[in-house]
Amino acid sequence: MRELNRRAILGTALALPAMHARAQAFPWRPERPVTLVVPWAAGGSTDQMARIAAAELEDALGQRFVVVNQPGASGSIGTRNVLQAARDGYTWAAGAAVDVGCYKVLGLLDTQLSDWNLFFTVANVNTISANPRAGFADFGQLLNALQTRRDVAVGTAGQSSAGRNIMEAVKAAAPGVNYRHATYDGGNPAVLAAVAGEVPVVAQLLVEMAEMIRGRRLIPLAVQSEQPVTLQGFGTIPSIRQWLPNIPAPLNYFGLWFPKDVPEVVTQTATMVWQQKMASSARLREYADARAAVLSPIHSQEAFDRAWIMVRQTAWLYHDAGTARVSPDTVGIQRL
């Protein structure tokens, strides 16, 4: 027993310098835990991704990254708290880049995509699914109901969520579409509401529905992508373009970010972690493969350029639907 204890102590002693040396290879080593704000409820797409990214950051930097859920107002409350925190690199945000890019257009928060240092992990696919008892076997049947009825409730995570975005895109692409918008505090609560039959249809991200689809508790009707998507353990989900050929199908980028005026060493360190660790992360790849997401460990200008496509499309979608508080072109977002 003494020998086992001695070995355990020796192993710990050897491991600590190794972690310290690994962390010291970066320009910045956090001296206390870093707060990672998820502005949505636990269990949703942002929460899932953020916890994996936090674990990778902890491995790289030898310090805890504490995930804190602060849902409300389509993610703008938690994001505002990050903006109001000290600019010392110890408070990061997580989410979908399109949300940050459109908050100003919706009048939710005075910020825009260019205010942030962007570090993406995955790109997600917007999806529409139905409760098996709702009577919709494919998207064509749902589309017909949306065009002939006014009582079809669709659950989403709120005003600027992926679910609302795809439903507004459907509304813009097909004449006569109408639906009753049922909002929840996150993608996971919206999905669970559809599973329970509280709403017949849910529009959110495939990563949030994957387990319920595999368990046959939801029927996936369509994905907002250029091509059909294959989900492990289920099969192929058709593209919404089978019914609406002209609907936009941008990738929905998710990741972590912090304001641009944090110390430069923080940005340098995050960039190095993304290049050296996130780009080859087995955890992120496993997560993406299991949920039909696209592994996208990109950062900086490349991340901005890719996300900007969906920001421009979505901002003008809000404008044309009458939900924008200000015209996108007045805040530098030109129509595609």
Image: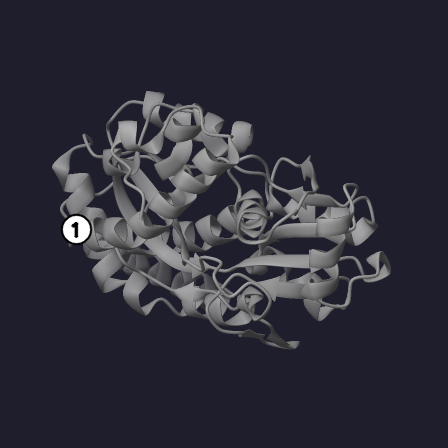
- Where 187 falls versus 302 (above or below)? above
Residue in the picture at 52% in, 49% down: 169
* Front position in the image: 309 or 278: 309
Residue 186: quadrant of the picture: top right
Q: Which residue is mark 1?
A: 26
Q: Nearer the viewer, residue 53 or 240?
A: 240
Q: Position of residue 294 (x, y in %)?
A: 42, 66
Amino acid at pointer 1: Phe
Task: Tell me residue 38's x, y (percent).
Answer: 47, 38
Left or right of 246? Residue 304 is: left
Q: Position of residue 184 (x, y in %)?
A: 66, 36
What's the residue at 38%, 24% (across, down)?
A: 326
Asked if residue 209 is positioned above or below residue 316 in the image, the reply reads below
**Quadrant of res 331:** top left
Q: Residue furthest right?
A: 133
Classify mark 1: residues with Cα within 10 Å, few (<14), some (14-19) or many (20+): some
Taking the image as shown, residue 272 lies to the left or right of residue 170, namely left
Q: SS of the residue at dot 1?
A: loop
Residue at 25 percent of width and 33 percent of height: 332
